[in-house]
Image: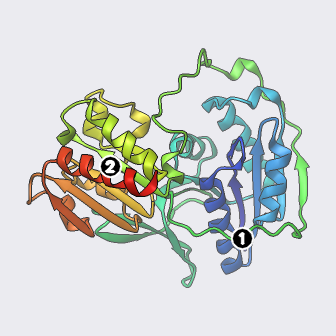
Amino acid sequence: MSRILVFTNQQEEGLSSGAKEALFFGSRLASSTGGEVCSVSLGPLAAAGAKESISLGAGIAYTISNPILTEYDVELYVNCIETVFQQSGADILILSFDRIGKDLVGRLAARTGASAITEVVDYNSNSDKLTWIRPIYGDKAFGEYTTTRSKAVVGIRKKSQNVDVTDETRIGEIIEVNYTPSEDMIVTKLVVKIQAALSDIRLEDARIIISGGRGIEGPEGFNDLHVLANLLGGTVGASRAACDAGWVPSNLQVGQTGAVVAPDLYIAVGISGASQHLAGITNAKTVVAINTDPEAPIFKRANIGVVADYKTVIQALTEKLKKVLV
């Protein structure tokens, strides 16, 4: 019987989509192993996060509500989550392997002497030993892994889990942990927030994404993508090459080292289709590729491929949609 703790990171409107996925995964695992799933929420809104966690399956919701946790700080969060992990008696800690999760998984495993495994999409509890399933070889295959230590810190791949419907009638216990994080733990401080995105829609939550790559040939081309994305109610993304070139902010990067997305429609404009980028769009429902190179790897993933200059296609599509939608 395992006891599972899930870190439930919050956004302004509630739990993040990644936290909900992690809770669903933890609840499913607990059901399979006869275990119990708990959650931990941090910051001034932790009580609200705890209630939502219970509605999504947590039996016990731990909170640390100190206002010092309002802004994410890696050292503060590691210390708080480590404290709850130890006090809860859990042997498995589950986090979404999003931008924050990538910060936390390795540090928490090192602090607690646990095994760390990332990009997990499923598990196997049929054998004597619980095993973890994750994609390998650029998502061309899946590997099954065991851990060698008594505790494990598990990072769940974003957009790999379906989320249960919230059940407000679920009953659970909320426990405020007696732990006070100190400002002495902070080694870096937030000075200013800069709004860098071209859209208010987060890449991970978008139903429609239009991404540009090296073939855009400069930052100006992203203005055209932005206009089209607004018409469709979507958002703009980019390949690593476009981000590295400084054409768009790095938080727009889609791929294995950026955002892992699962939109209904993904339009790849001037993107060749490197394996790292394809790993980030594995769960996209429909992929449209626009590229002048008919041999570009992106066409192997695309449902619809257009071999043409992107300017001609995007401008024509935008004008057509303006007549139909506006």
Residue 265 visible in image: yes
Disc 2 target residue: 318
277 above or below 287? Answer: above
Where is mark 1, residue-wise? 165
Label 1 neighbourhood size at 10 Å, few (<14), some (14-19), many (20+)?
few
Q: Residue at x 66, y 59 (%)?
A: 20
The earlier-in-sequence mark between 1 and 2 is: 1
Q: Position of residue 46 (x, y in %)?
A: 81, 43
Specify whether 1 is left or right of 203. Answer: right
Q: Quadrant of the N terminus?
A: bottom right
Q: Quadrant of residue 307?
A: bottom left
Count of marks overlaid on the render: 2
Near-viewer residue (136 or 89): 136
Task: Judge depth for marks 1 and 2 and give the one in front.
Answer: 2
Q: In the displayed structure, would residue 73 be above or below residue 23?
A: above
Q: Secondary structure at mark 2?
A: helix
Foreground of the two, 131 or 55: 55
Front residue of 306/284: it is 306
Residue at position x 57%, y 53% from top? 96
Asked if residue 253 shows in the view, the reply is no
* Viewer-closest of 142 and 211: 211
Report x, y in % for residue 64: 82, 39
Q: In the orientation shown, which residue stands out farthest toward the bottom?
A: 126
Local secondary structure at mark 1? loop
Residue at x 49%, y 51% (from the top left corner): 233
Amino acid identity at mark 2 = Thr
Give me the C-alpha separation between circle 1 and circle 2: 36 Å
For residue 80, above or below residue 289? above
Q: Amino acid at mark 1?
A: Val
Task: Tell me: 118 left or right of 295.
Answer: right
x and y, in percent, of residue 221 in the image: 26, 35
